[in-house]
Structure formats: C-alpha cells, structure tokens
Image: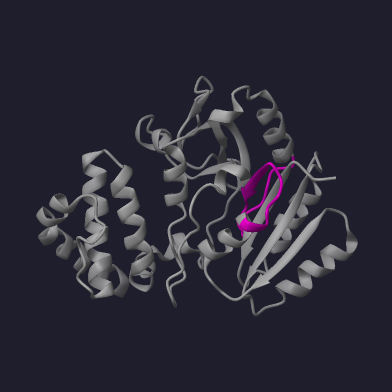
Amino acid sequence: MLKKITVFTPTFNRAYCLHQLYESLLRQSSKDFCWLVIDDGSTDTTKELVQSWVITAEIEIKYVYQDNQGMHGAHNTAYQLIETELNVCIDSDDYMPDNAIQLILDKWSEVSNKENMAGIVGVDIFKDGKIVGAEIPDKLASSTLYDLYYKYKISGDKKLVLRTEIVKEYPKYPLFGEERFVPLGILYLMIDQQYQLACLNKPLCVVEYLPDGSSRNIFKQYKKNPNGFRYSRIIELKYIKNFKISVLKVLHLISSTLFIGDYQFFKNNPRKWLTFICLPMGLLFHVYILFKIKK
C-alpha cells in the first residue's frame, strides 16, 4: 500500500550522524511514510549503514546511490522517484520530532482547498526546543514562503512539505559541470507564483548546523558555484518586487558573473537597467566576498 508521505534525505559522507534521523523515524507515532535516501556519491560507510537498516524492515526505506551532483542534483533525483502525495526533505544532519509525521497528516486532512495549496509550511527547532527564527502566527492560515519572510517578517528557516504533483510541474535544477550547488529556494519561489502553503506553527524538524554544511560555507560557495548562483539570481529578479532585495540580488549576480569571467551581466537578465546602474557597487561587493573567503 502506497504511503501518504515520503521523507527524503540527500546525504554525502554523513554516516557518522545519519543514525539520529533514522532513530527519529523509528519513533514516529505515525508510520504512514517511507524514507528515500539519496546517496550523493558518499565514500564513507553510508551504503552499508542504510542497507543494514533496510534489512531490519522496521520502516520502509529506499536507498539510491548516484555520482556526486550536489544537494540540488539529489533533490532532482528524489522528485523524479517520489510517488506519494506529499514529500518533505530532512537533511542528513537533522531529524524529526516524534509526532512530526502525524502533525503533517493531521494538518493536510484539515485543508479544504487543496487545489490551491502546494503543501504545508512548518517550523524548525534547535535541539534545545527553541524555534529557529520566529513562530508562524496561529491566525495565519496560509501564505507563500516569500510573503512569510518579506510581508509578515517571519525570520528563520522553515520546513516545507510539498505536494509531489506540484513539484513535478516545475523545471529540474540545472547541473553545471563541476559545480555542486544551486540554491534550492528558486523552486519554492516559482511555486509561490501559483500556490499557497498551509501554515502550521508546529515543529517538523530539529536542526543542527554542522561545520561542513553549506550554510556555514556560503562565501566559498559563491566562488565555487557561480553559474548556479547566477541562474538563481536571474530567476529571483524575475519575481521579486521589493527594491532593496532586488538590488542585493543584482549585486550577487554581478559578483557571480565576475567569478565566471564571461561578463554576460545582461543575458536573460530581467532587470538590465538596475544591473547597469549597480555595476560599480557589484564590483565592490565582489571584492567583499573575496575578502570574506580569505578570512
């Protein structure tokens, strides 16, 4: 029988911490889920570890190995394989509260206008129980992710539970040669243009920002993955209306283009005049990124 939700986990050399997510899935009060592990080219014991869990058959697990493509490439593979109505990404260094699956299922059953909803947005918490950023107001029934951050000023990472059929409507994240990072948020921004998210002010994920995580190494990521960032900034500039945010995205686009070295600042760029005006500031911003990398 097909489960209701897929928990999918992109992982790369995280055998040392993956057990805490597995153990949290074993503790779930609802077992109406399957776990999809996308091994993005690990060279540690991830494969043997996950296969040992598969053998126990305590929960439904599917393990898929692929050559290293980066987080976005692992998401592409997951979205291609998922067949359940809902899906949620839980990173390999995070885990779920014991009632998270049940909270998701209960909330989704309450949503009456599902055709207008891309899924659910819940909150992340730290291990001490403190919410990452700000709570989602209980009175807020639905919102786009963009409005949550920029209209309602609700800070901090949030956990998205998405309808699989909606995700499949949108383009895959592009792969750029040896680069291994494209910001995942561009998919969510595109979804925001057509769909809302049901708001759930409950913790769905317990997070820990490890030293080898991408969020801790963002300035190095700018240099290592300029094509991915430029692609992202062009999409963001198409949809973002806030002027200050648009300027920041333009500065990032200019810096990414300088890292690429092709000087195509205006190709496919929906904000050409703003980019032209911001070129001097973009150069200074690029120098700032170089400074941060060297620190």
From this view, report whether residue 4 is shown above or below residue 172.
Answer: above
> How far across and down, in percent of the image, does residue 260 sit?
28, 73
- Residue at the right extreme, as displayed: 56
Residue drawn at x 42%, y 71% is: 176
Q: Which residue is drawn at 45% across and 64% down?
A: 174
Relative to 193, is 234 on the left or the right?
A: left
149 or 203, which lies in front? Answer: 149
- Give the side of residue 277 with respect to residue 245, left or right: left
Image quadrant in which the N terminus is located: top right
The answer to whether 52 appears left or right of 170 in the picture is right
Percent x, y for residue 178?
44, 77
> Does the magenta run of residues contain 91?
yes
Residue 101 colored in magenta in the image? no
Between 285 and 173, the one lying in front of the other is: 173
- Residue 50 percent coordinates (x, y): 77, 67
Residue 203 appears anywhere in the view: yes
Q: What residue is shown at x 71% (from left), y 72% (from top)?
A: 46
Inspect this view and state whether residue 163 appears.
no
Residue at 63% over, 25% down: 111
Q: Residue furthest top?
A: 139
The span picked out in magenta is: 80-98
Judged left or right of residue 187, residue 42 is right
> In the figure, 108 relative to 92: above or below?
above
Q: Is the magenta stretch mostly helix, strand or loop?
A: loop
